[in-house]
Image: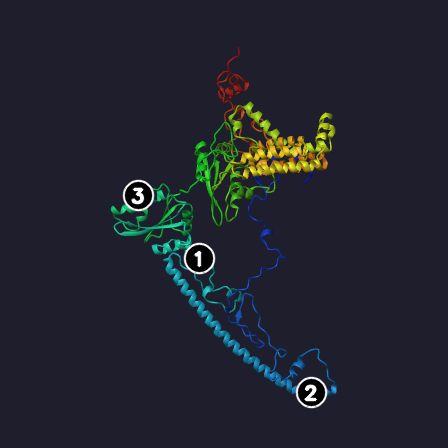
Amino acid sequence: MSVWSKIGRLFAVDDTILDEDFSLLGKTKGRSGSEPESAQMPRQDDPPEKEPPEEEQVAEPEREPEDGGSTNRIKYRKTIRPRKIGRAAQVEKDGSEAVRESEGAGGEREPKATQASRGDDREKAEQKSDGTGREKDAEGAQKSDSKGREKEAEAAQKSDSTGREKAAEAARKSGGHGRARETEADVQQSDDDDSSADGEGKETPDDLEEEAVPEKIGASLAENRERVEFIFRMPTNADVVIRDFWVVDHVPVRAFAVFLEGLSDTKIINEYVLEPLMLRAKEPTNGGKDDLLERAREMLVPGNQVAVYDAWTEATKQILTGSTALFFEGIDKTLVVATNGWAHRGVGETKTETVVRGPHDAFTENLRANTGLVRARLRTERLITEMMQIGELAPTDLAIMYVDGIVNPALVEEVKRRIEAVKVDFLQDSGQLEQFIEEPPRGLIPRMMATERPDRVAQSLSEGFVSVFVGQSPYVLIMPTMLWSLIHTPEDAYLRFPFGSFIRLIRFIAFVAAMLLPAIYIAITNYHPEMIPTDLMLTIAAAREKVPFPLVLEVLLMELALELIREAGIRIPNVIGPTIGIVGALILGQAAVQAAVISPLLVIVVAVTALSAFTMPNYNISFAVRTLRFLFIFLAACWGFYGITLGVMFMSMHWAQTKSFGVPMLTPIAPFKRSSPDVIIRGPIYEQEMRPRPLYPQSLRRQTPFTRSWAPTTHDSEEARRKKAKENPDREPRSRR
């Protein structure tokens, strides 16, 4: 794409010119998640996959070669061809050298007279040697063939008996539900197919585990207990607790409960699971084992979330989430009761998005508590929460929240498609998910907003955004996002619009200063001193007269020292955190100025830059600003204001073509979209009638055009009269006095 086409994106009116794989306007090429045919077909230049050599030797019958030679009866993964035996390879036991001289090449030739005189003797020797060799070849082949057939019959018989014993044992353990899958190809070996015979009749560790833990739950309580101990690696695993007890109906029934200590609430288990089942023994009722599970679910266990499962995979997942599984003798199902109760941090104040006016609660490390904080604010039946899981080794719960009837369905499908494509063993935090699903992945500015404020998530959902909660992460992802949203704060909406607009202007100025102020100082001092007054230029020159370092190196040293102080203030304990700031800012800065290592004016420039960076309300955008600052310092050191101008142009073009889930990052300015006055300057709240147009929500209007109908400035306006006339066409308009 040419530079002019990228510049044209800044003044684009519609975002359909931005060619991307996904757009909220509809499907485009590359929308499908399937791979193209070229990616699925193997290339011709790819080398064929080599199969690893097999340690165990498998005996197989082979056809006897036509030349009568012997064959190898031991087969490996790589087929060994029959070894041909000829007269050149035979060595006579009597030590005769006549045959080897006749077959060898490179020996000296005897004269014709000598050959003629010895011709008859050589012919006789050859015939004798040839006959002896053929007799030995035939005898060796017959002996090797008989030994091979004996070994092969013995191996086949042994494999047959072993396979049948294991299949019978697995079928007996599973109780009829998890029979071992036995085929003829696993027991018998084909004499003609060499490739399939190499892997038949052998059991892998996966097959053994599959036989030990069948798919369905059995009816034998002892076998179910053994399988639970096998699944959770007991007794090595000390977190798993198995509690045996009796449930006495008209016939006593043995049972046991399984739960994980630390994830389950033992008080709930004792009072609401074990106590009702064990005390029910004093009140026997009629019925057999068949209806015991149903009566326990409907009458005995007072849990609010009770489910019945018949598969081991589902029961294992529920136990790992903190639930308690109940197994009964003679019942091939399990009763799972929700007893989640692990320790977690309570709802507290925000750490990175503090405000003066507004809610002070923040998300915690509890997924359901986080979704509850949002639903407590956005109390509507149209608020949807979809649960998903990511992780092959340890699944992590995810919650996708959106408002049905407002959000664009294409946005929801795209978010779910990207999340389902993530295949990873373990996902711990929302920051990891953000790196997996963002596009493009190498940009500096974030394409999703991470927040710990429930009020911000609720407001975003009401406007048509999608929120994703990740496991025990206290940060929630809001997608898509625009650059302007990363600089906004929830407090802007809680203040009157003049004050909110003033704070936003200060924040946008700080955003520019944090990126460009050190670069502008370098450009003016080194390349463009004529742009500043003469007195200021002389002051700068006098301050730098004793400094031994170049200006660029001086700025870099100060910036690196500032980053060290910032990082040290974050990592050290909170008790001595302010001490580091005082030591770094006062003592080191003052000592550096007195030692003439840096100039006093540079200290002022770096301090203003640091204060500007601290005003960034979003943690991720502050990282982007700090990184771009060093890039602009390099450009200013090389080309002055020309380098800064080129950097700003390329950065603007990159941001204009960057999309967040189909929404351009600079919209509604580039491309331009008509929207409510809430981009840079915040307008009055009663004028913000429309939802963000770049999201293409199903319902664009979020409030009536005249929310202040009681105010004279509103109901006496010409627009109000037109609206009233449109609503009441039969009513005559009131004449003006």
Residue depicted at 32% across the width and 53% down the height: 329
Q: Do the residues under discs 2 and 1 have CB atoms within 8 angstroms?
A: no
Mark 2 vs 1, N-terminal side = 2
Image x and y of residue 314, in percent: 41, 49
Q: Is residue 263 above or below residue 192?
A: above
Residue 558 visible here:
yes
Residue depicted at 26% across the width and 47% down the height: 281
Task: Out of 154 and 353, give the one closest to the viewer.
Answer: 353
Q: Amino acid at mark 1?
A: Glu
Which circle marks residue 185 in the picture?
Answer: none
Kindly state the secondary structure of the residue where label 1 is placed: helix
Disc 3 and disc 1: Cα gap in Å?
37 Å
Query: In screen coordinates, is 70 left or right of 209?
Result: right
Q: Is residue 683 above or below residue 642?
A: above
Image depth: mark 3 or mark 2 in front: 3
Q: Amino acid at mark 2?
A: Gly
Image x and y of residue 571, in percent: 54, 39
Identify residue for label 2: 119
Task: Out of 520 and 162, give the one closest to the viewer.
Answer: 520
Identify residue for label 1: 209
Q: Amino acid at mark 3?
A: Met
Say few, some or many: other residues with alpha carbon within 10 Å of mark 2 (under 14 / 14 to 19 / 20 or more). few
Identify residue for label 3: 299
Query: In screen coordinates, is 593 left or right of 200?
Result: right
Image x and y of residue 255, in percent: 32, 51
Image x and y of residue 165, in percent: 40, 65
Disc 2 and disc 1: Cα gap in Å?
73 Å
Mark 3 vs 2, N-terminal side = 2
